Image: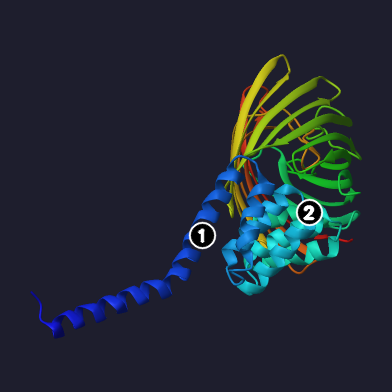
Amino acid sequence: MCSKPMRSMVLSRTSIVVTALVLAWPSVGRADRYSRSMRAAGVEASQGNWERAADLLGRIADTYPEDYNLHLTRAWYLFQQGDYESARSSYELALKISGGAADARLGLGWCAQRTGDLDEARRQFEAVLEIEPNNPNAAEGLALVRPSNTFIPYAYLFFEKFQGHPWRDYHLGTEVGLDSVIDGNFLLDFGYRYLYIRGLSLGVGTRDVIQQHEAQAVMGFATTEWGLTVHGIYARYGESGSLMAGPGKDSGAVGLSARYTYWADFLLSAAYSFYDDFGVVQADMAVALPATEWLTLSAAFEFQYGDERFWPSGRAEILFHERAWSLALGGSFGTRLRPVDLTAGLIYNTFDRPSGAAWARTAVALGPVVTLHLSYGFERLLSPSLRGSGTDVGYGHSISAGLSLALH
């Protein structure tokens, strides 16, 4: 049996513990309520009950005015519910609490976009890209709220030197054009290319020359999910020598390309190119996969039918990209017959057959309007032999440089 002093000490300690539990109970209760509300809201959201989820978090929002995660999550539920004004208020509160977090700015930008405040949306998306240069959601949002009419004039100079080619020495040329986006979705592109082709003297004291003029036009419609584009190319020789003239003075191509975007860009294209001697049918299947925020991998398979046979080939490319620059490294394999590049608007009106290539290209933003483009390419070419039978192998090295200006 305890003595009286010992019993008093036990009672005193018990009183202290009980008093501490009583004083702590409100905060323990609030914490438990917070956890229950967050879990319950998550369950409702997983079932698509966005209004119920937002309401559950709204009941405890005033109790935790400085909880960034709470207000950011509630803003997302309100956005999914379609209450963009309330979502915007919650995103603004989360932005204030965080001191400028990218997630809060991104949500604020999308709310502004949905409510028609395009200037505010543009500011927020640009701010996100300053923090996270490769944020795909911010880049997509910025593309949607850009001015409805965008014009990009461009000009390029290019030079190609041949090594071991039986009759070609070098190419020199220029390209000018205008890419335009009308009302955010309609695409109109026009371009002109001039090419001066210098041949070897071949011991006869003169050099053959070709001057090729080429025009291209592109019309299309595109959204973030899909796109459809029509292409047209026409090429004509201004004057030509006997060895390098190719199949004839006139050639052209028409093509159609389609894109569908889900977890990657899936592209299909088809083209028909025509010459004096025969036509070539070309089909291309490609996929571009964003592996990370700064890396995209692409691969394609192509087949052609012309000159009474099939010509299969393929290519692959790795693209590194930041907000202000990009670098692409790629290569192709397989022999192609007078191929058409719909993207570049280029038609090969020559007897040469490209048979494998490698390239590197980069684009560097010099400011908000001006972009510098540089590229190098190496190509293996198969040419009819001057000896009357067989095939000669030659190689071409090309460099190009150009500028584009984005005008709004």
Q: Quadrant of the N terminus?
A: bottom left
Disc 2 versus disc 1: nearer the observer: 1
The CA distance from mark 2 to mark 1 is 42 Å
Q: Nearer the viewer, residue 379 or 47?
A: 47
Residue 301, image quadrant? top right
Point out the tag, 2 or 1, that comes first from the N-terminus: 1
Q: Secondary structure at mark 1?
A: helix
In the rendered image, is residue 132 in sight?
no
Q: Secondary structure at mark 2?
A: helix
Q: Which numbered circle lies on residue 244? A: none
In the rendered image, is residue 26 in sight?
yes
The residue tagged 2 is: 143
Question: Residue at 58% of width from left, 50% of height from top?
Answer: 41
Q: Rate crowding at label 2 as few (under 14), some (14 to 19) or many (20 or more) other CA atoms within 10 Å.
A: some
Q: Position of residue 145 (x, y in %)?
A: 82, 56
Vertical order, 79 against 233 (above or below): below
Residue 101, image quadrant? bottom right
Q: Nearer the viewer, residue 7 or 129?
A: 7
Q: Which numbered circle lies on residue 33? A: 1
Is 267 positioned to the left or the right of 4 in the image? right
Q: Residue furthest bottom?
A: 5
Rendering colour mode: rainbow
Vertical order, 271 against 160 (above or below): above
Residue type, label 1: Arg
Mark 2 and 1 residues: CB-CB less than 8 Å, in contact? no
Q: Position of residue 22 (x, y in %)?
A: 40, 72
Q: Nearer the viewer, residue 295 or 212?
A: 295
Q: Position of residue 318 (x, y in %)?
A: 58, 47
Question: Residue at 66% of width from left, 54% of height from top?
Answer: 55
Vertical order, 62 against 162 (above or below): below
Question: Residue at 68% of width from left, 23% of height from top?
Answer: 388
